[in-house]
Amino acid sequence: MRVACQKTARVLQRVAEAVEPGITTGDIDALMRQYTKEEGGKPTFLGYGGFPGAICISINDEVIHGIPGGRVVLPGDVVSLDAGVWYDGFTGDSARTVMVGVIDPDVIRLVETTREALEVGISKVKPGVHLSDVSNAIQGVAEGAGFSVVREFVGHGVGRHLHEEPQVPNYGAPGRGPILKPGMTLAIEPMINLGRRGVRVLDDNWTVVTCDGKPSAHFEHTVAVTEEGAEILTLAN
């Protein structure tokens, strides 16, 4: 599991570094495939549930599950990248939002707050706490900054399969749900909107967008519960 997650981290880091004005989402997808092959793995998302790409690329008001293609990245775009690498029977899962020449202070604050929400959520991970303590911490950071939390899509367990139990919402009251135990591996992934929390799925049956057309940000790490607390498995070494 650690090896698959490290491969995921390295690939996503390289892909994120390549995002710049003029690159297409199809180009980014090609890099995902190339870098994953160099790591000796396979793109987890490719063909998963029929998904046609190797990586989810969601721009501006697209929250998650954007399909790679001919769209060109432009200055001022926020580009969310969500990827996994399958290796030796396990998969990692990680996401980050890249700002491409963004100067809008509200959008910058949205991205920084979403990253912070993930960090604070992870800080709550330790044996004996309720899963909803993580969820509540994420919600508190996001809503405390004046943003809204997507509720229709959540984090999840991850390991031998991309989506395993338990579900990991980014909202909710503390002190509820499963008790965290050493050995659990979770994909924690806040999806935070600049405007209202409502989302809808486009006619391609994949791309999720905000209902009000305002930007969204997405960060994710695969985290292991240990006796000492949280071990972030998708931090690139």
Image (cartoon, rainbow, N blue to C red):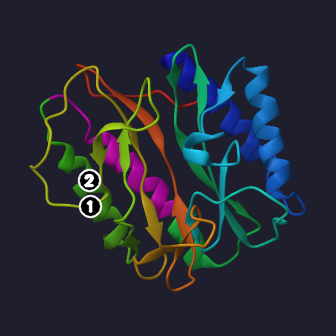
Q: Which residue is mark 2?
A: 135
Q: Is residue 169 visible?
A: yes
Return the residue nearer the eye: 173 or 154.
154
Could you tell me what secondary structure mostly forms the magenta stretch? helix
Compared to 187, does 203 lie above or below? Answer: below
10 Å neighbourhood of mark 2: few (<14), some, or many (≥20)? many
Q: Secondary structure at mark 1?
A: loop
Q: Residue furthest bottom?
A: 212
Q: Secondary structure at mark 2?
A: helix
Return the residue nearer the eye: 2 or 43.
43
Q: Residue at x 25, y 48 (%)?
A: 134
Q: Residue at x 83, y 53 (%)?
A: 26
Query: Given the image, on which type of amino acid does mark 2 rest?
Result: Ser
Q: Is residue 65 magenta?
A: no
Q: Position of residue 187 (x, y in %)?
A: 41, 39
Q: Position of residue 171 (x, y in %)?
A: 26, 61
Query: Which picture quadrant has residue 59?
Result: bottom right
As drawn, is 75 to the left or to the right of 214?
right
**The disc label shown at residue 100, or none:** none
**Closer to the N terminus: mark 2 or mark 1?**
2
Read off the magenta span: 112-127
Query: Given the image, on which type of amino acid does mark 1 rest?
Result: Tyr
Q: Is residue 126 magenta?
A: yes
Report, in whole angstroms, how far the alpha carbon at label 2 lies from the one at label 1: 5 Å
Compared to 113, does 44 lie above or below? Answer: above
Q: Is residue 237 visible?
A: no
Q: Which residue is mark 1?
A: 171
Query: Which picture quadrant has residue 13?
Result: top right
As drawn, is 116 to the left or to the right of 169?
right
Q: Residue furthest left?
A: 175
Q: Position of residue 217 (x, y in %)?
A: 54, 63
Q: Residue at x 79, y 53 (%)?
A: 19
